[in-house]
Image (cartoon, grey):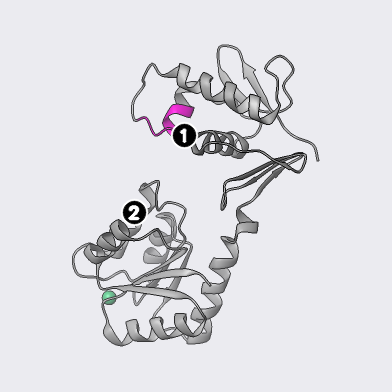
Amino acid sequence: MARIWTVEDEEHISVLIVDVLKDMGHEVQHFWDGAELNKGLAKHPVPDLLLLDLMLRGKSGFDLLKQWKQKAETRHVPVLILSARSTENDKVKGLDLGAEDYITKPFSIRELKARINAALRRVTPEALRVELGALRLEPDNRGVYVDGASVALTQQEFELLLYLAKNTGHILSRGQLLKDVWGYESETDASRTVDYHIKSLRRKLGDEAQNPRFIETVHGSGYRLKEQTA
Ligand code: CA
């Protein structure tokens, strides 16, 4: 069962979508427009999938999609566009803005179900896992394993390690890490924050700065997660 939200302003289509989702065994929340959607977001945890109409009162579906893909909180949630707008331009725009898929109305129930299942398969816990040799990360439950043994990390350490892992082999500067992991907007002199967390991370992973198994210090540049062999 997944938690799926839908934004749709046509009543009969809303009823149809909600029925289909419930029939599939999912938990559904329906919103009439972007304003309601944002209120929902303030009250509830983010859903596993969002079905989004384009022509809505207030903010358009494109605007809402753009917002979702900009916010750290919602960026990872796959969005399926459901729209009567069927031009290639609309589809390309939607996919460029980060939509997972684009379904044109009218759609068949079978097709809708198939596309929803495909989108959910891509975001299952298994699909989100990162395996790098002896190191395994499970973002859905913040699990970290070294040689199969569980390692307890803080949220910040986990985010840092995940970012390093997703950029394996690349040197990441302290400034870049502060921006992408900590969310600092501008250049700040907080590089010791990064060093402190790297130190703690190494200790927990059983890694050594002098003879690194995982995290290398690249002098004058930053840090890098070494390529791992299976
Ligand atoms: Ca509409």
User: Between marks 2 and 1, how big is the CA–CA gap?
Assistant: 21 Å
Q: Is residue 86 above or below residue 194?
A: below
Q: Which element type, helix, strand or loop, lies under badge 2? A: helix
Reply yes or no: does residue 210 show up in magenta: no
Q: Is residue 76 above or below residue 219?
A: below
Label number found at residue 93: none
Q: Residue lying furthest right in this view?
A: 230
Q: Tell me if mark 2 has few (under 14), some (14-19) or many (20+) residues whose alpha carbon lies within 10 angstroms of its own.
A: some
Whether residue 186 is visible to the viewer of this picture, yes or no, is yes
Reply yes or no: does residue 183 show up in magenta: yes
User: Residue 174 appears at what percent x and percent y?
Assistant: 49, 22
Q: Which residue is mark 2?
A: 66
Q: Is residue 12 above or below residue 3?
A: below
Q: Is residue 11 left or right of residue 107?
A: left
Q: Out of 138 and 222, give the one closest to the viewer.
A: 138
Identify the residue at horizontal 50%, vertical 39% (top origin).
Answer: 155
Lower position in the chain sequence, tag 2 or tag 1? 2
Q: Quadrant of ligand 1?
A: bottom left
Q: Is residue 122 above or below residue 221?
A: below
**Figure quadrant of residue 224:** top right
**Figure quadrant of residue 49:** bottom left
Q: Which residue is mark 1?
A: 181
User: Residue 94 appears at what percent x and percent y?
Assistant: 39, 61
User: Residue 72 appears at what percent x and percent y?
Assistant: 40, 46
Q: Amino acid at mark 1?
A: Val
Number of numbered markers: 2
Give the mark toward the camera: 2 or 1.
1
User: Residue 182 appears at what percent x and percent y?
Assistant: 42, 32
Q: Out of 212 and 85, give the one closest to the viewer.
A: 212
Identify the residue at horizontal 35%, vertical 58% (top origin).
Answer: 65
Q: Amino acid at mark 2?
A: Lys
The range drawn in magenta is 177-184
